[in-house]
Image (spheres, coloured by chain):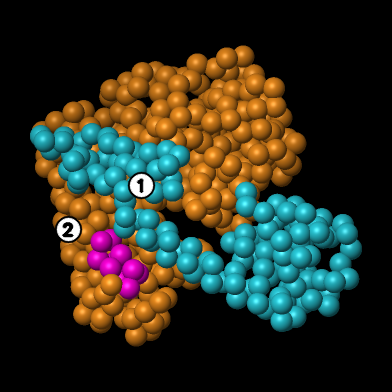
Chain colours: A orange, B cyan
Amino acid sequence: MKIDFEHRQAAHCESGVTSNLLWNASGGKITEPLAFGIGAGLFFAYIPLIKVNNGPAIAFRTMPGFIFNRTCKSLKIPVVRKKFGSKEKAQTFLDECLDNGHAVGCQVGVYYLPYFPKEYRFHFNAHNLIVYGKEGDNYLVSDPIMETANVLDSYQLERVRFAKGALSPKGHIYYPKENKDITDDQIKQAIKSGIKKNVYNMLSIPGSFAGISGIKNTGLKIKKWRDKLGLEKSGLYLAQMVRMQEEIGTGGGGFRYIYGAFLQEADVYLPGNQLTEISSIFTKAGDMWRTAAVHAAGIYKGRIGSQEDFNTMGDYLLEIAAVEKAAFETLKKIKWQ
Amino acid sequence: MKKDDVPQDLSSLGKITKEVCYATDGNGKYVTELSSGWDVKITALDTAWGDIEKRIAAAKQQVIDGKASPLLFFIEYRLMDIAILAGYTGFWKWQIKRHLKPEVFNKLSDNKLKKYAEAFNTKVEDLKTMTVHED
C-alpha cells in the first residue's frame, strides 16, 4: 500500500518528525517551529554526573519524546506509542502500521545508521525518523535532517531501532492515531500552553542544573575549568558544549533561532501580544550563543587559553542568562489579547 | 543570525547533506536557509575525534603490552563503554570486565566471541588480531 507522504527537510529531528506526521491532518499548518514551540522544546541543562562521550551531558532542548507528546496532547490528537522487548514483534507491528496506511515515527540510535557520515556517528539514541513504506526487504525512510529520503534494509533498520546504551529506543514507535482536523482555535490554545510550559521550564525548575539558573551556573563553573580540569579537558568540554549547541538538528544558536521563528509564527495566530518583538530577543540570544561558540573554538583550537579567556567565556553565559531571563519573564507576563 | 551570515564552510556532513538553519531576512522575518557547515562546529568535532584517536591508540598499546584483551581496543574503536557493550552482547558488566583480562579472553568460547564480533560489527578473526576495516 502506498502511503500519502512527502519527505520534507527540517532542522531538528523530533520537531521535524512531529510536523511531518501532522502535515496532512493540519493541512501543513503545524510547521517545524510551531511544533517546537507548542512542544515547549527550548531548554538548557548541564548534568556533569551523566557522561556523554566522556564529557558532561549538556542539552539545549527538552527531553527526547516530549515535543511530539506535548504537541499532540495540546492539539488533542490521540497518539499510539509502543516499545518492544522483541525485535520480531517490533518489525511485525511496524509492517502492520504500514499496511494500514500509517507513516510512523521511530526513535533510533545513530551509531549504525548507514547514511550518516562516520564522523557524526556516536552512540546517540534519541534520533527520530519516519518510516513511510516498504518495498521488498527495504523500508522507505524520511529522516528530517537529510535533504532527501533514504532506504534501509530490514537488518539495518532493526539495528538502529534496537541500538543500546543510554536512552536506548527499544523499538520505540509512535504516530497520530487518526487524522483529525486541527482548527486555528486549537492552535491558538496550544501556542499559549506551549509558551506557559516553556516559561516554567526555563524560569521555575528547582535546582541550579536546568533553565536560566543552569546557564548561569554553567557560566560560573566554566571560569573554574582551567584550574580544575586543565586546558586539554576544558577544551574538550567546551567542544562538547558547542556541538550540542550547534550540531545538526539545532537550527543554529542552541535552538534559540527556531524558537524565535516560532514566536513570529505565533504572532500571526495571536496578534497584539508583542510576540514579534519578543522573538527578536531570542534572535539576539542565539547570536550571543554563536559569539560564545566562536570564543570557545579559540580555546579548543589552542589559539587562546588564559584564565582571562575562560573568564570571558563564563561571562558570555552570564550575559545570555540575563537576556533569556528577561525574554521569558516578558512571555510570562503576557495578558493574552 | 542574518540569512546572508549563514556559514558555508564545507563539513563532512555537508558533502552528504546540507542542514537547515533558521535565520532572518532583510525585514527581520525568519526564513530557512541551507548551510553546508560551520568552521566552529567542524573544529569542535575534530577536537572530539582527536581525543577518541588518542584513547584508541592508548587502548591498543595496553593490548600489545598484555595488560588488556582486544575487547578494550574495540570498545574504544566503537566509541562504546562497558554498559553499551553489555547492551549489545547481553553479557553482564562484571562478565565483560573479566573478559577484558587477556588470560580470560584467550579462553572464551567461539559462541561468546561471536557475540562480541557482532556487537563490534567485525569478524571473530579480526577481533582477536585487532584488525579493522573501514566501513
> Is B17 situated left or right of A123 in this image?
left
> Was residue A299 drawn as part of the magenta stretch in this picture?
yes
Q: Are marks 2 and 1 in contact (CB under 8 Å)?
A: no
Q: In front: B55, or B126?
A: B126
The magenta-colored residue range is: A293-302
Whether residue A319 is visible here, answered yes or no, is yes
The residue under the point 76% across, 65% down is: B129
The residue under the point 81% across, 59% down is: B125
The residue under the point 85% across, 71% down is: B106
> Is A37 situated left or right of A150 in this image?
left
Q: In front: A261, or A294?
A: A294
Label ID, residue A323:
2
Q: In front: B58, or A141?
A: B58
> Is A75 rendered above or below residue B17?
above
**Could you say where residue A139 lies in the image, as x and y percent from the top left?**
62, 28
Q: Dot 2, crowdedness within 10 Å: few (<14), some or many (≥20)?
A: some
> Is A24 rendered above or below residue A322?
above
Q: Which residue is mark 1?
A: B10
Q: In the image, what residue type sits under mark 1?
A: Leu
